[in-house]
Image (cartoon, rainbow, N blue to C red):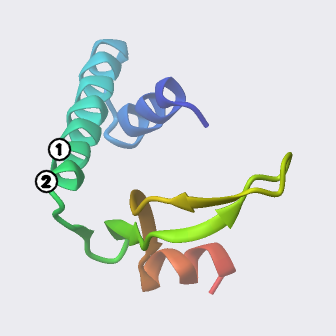
């Protein structure tokens, strides 16, 4: 499902007409922007029952260049992650 399909589903669940699909799409864009801004600031975003958006930090480490076999150092990095909530897990499992 892409973003347009998602906004259509949201408008459908809210029993709205086509004009409201545009509003639903703008709401999705605003939500994603707010989540992104929070993660950039290092904050955790909690959607109770659905899940948490967090930033994980990978420690610096050494590795090898696969082409040359030469040792290289890999810097510390940050990566966004999603941790599903209990209700989402149960729904996906069909319980």
Quadrant where the C terminus sits is bottom right
Left or right, 54 with respect to 39, comes to: right
Marks counted in the figure total: 2
Q: Residue at x 18, y 61 (%)?
A: 42
Q: Which residue is mark 2?
A: 41
Q: Which residue is mark 1?
A: 37
For the residue carrying disc 1, how many other residues have a C-alpha within 10 Å: few (<14), some (14-19), or many (20+)? few
Q: Residue at x 21, y 49 (%)?
A: 40
Task: State the CA–CA distance, disc 1 to disc 2.
Answer: 6 Å
Camera-near label (1 vs 2) is 2
Q: Secondary structure at mark 2?
A: loop
Q: Is residue 87 above or below residue 7?
A: below
Residue 29 locus on image (x, y percent):
28, 30
Q: Residue at x 83, y 53 (%)?
A: 66
Residue 58 locus on image (x, y percent):
44, 70
Q: Residue at x 39, y 39 (%)?
A: 10
Left or right, 72 with respect to 56, comes to: right
Quadrant where the N terminus sits is top right
Task: Pick whichever, 56 or 3, lies toward us.
Answer: 56
Residue 13 occupies quadrant: top left
Q: Secondary structure at mark 1?
A: helix
Residue 2 locus on image (x, y percent):
56, 31
Quick check: marks 1 and 2 in contact, CB under 8 Å? yes
Residue 83 occupies quadrant: bottom left
Task: Pick whichever, 78 or 10, lies toward us.
Answer: 78
Task: Pick whichever, 77 or 91, lies toward us.
Answer: 77
């Amino acid at each position: 499902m892409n973003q347009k399909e998602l906004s259509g589903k949201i408008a459908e669940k809210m029993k709205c007409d086509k004009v409201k699909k545009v509003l639903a799409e703008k709401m999705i864009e605003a939500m994603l922007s707010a989540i992104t801004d929070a993660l950039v600031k290092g904050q955790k975003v909690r959607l109770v029952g659905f899940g948490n958006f967090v930033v994980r930090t990978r420690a610096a480490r050494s590795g090898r260049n696969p082409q040359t076999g030469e040792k290289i150092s890999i810097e510390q990095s940050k990566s966004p992650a999603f941790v599903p909530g209990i209700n989402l897990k149960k729904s996906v499992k069909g319980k």
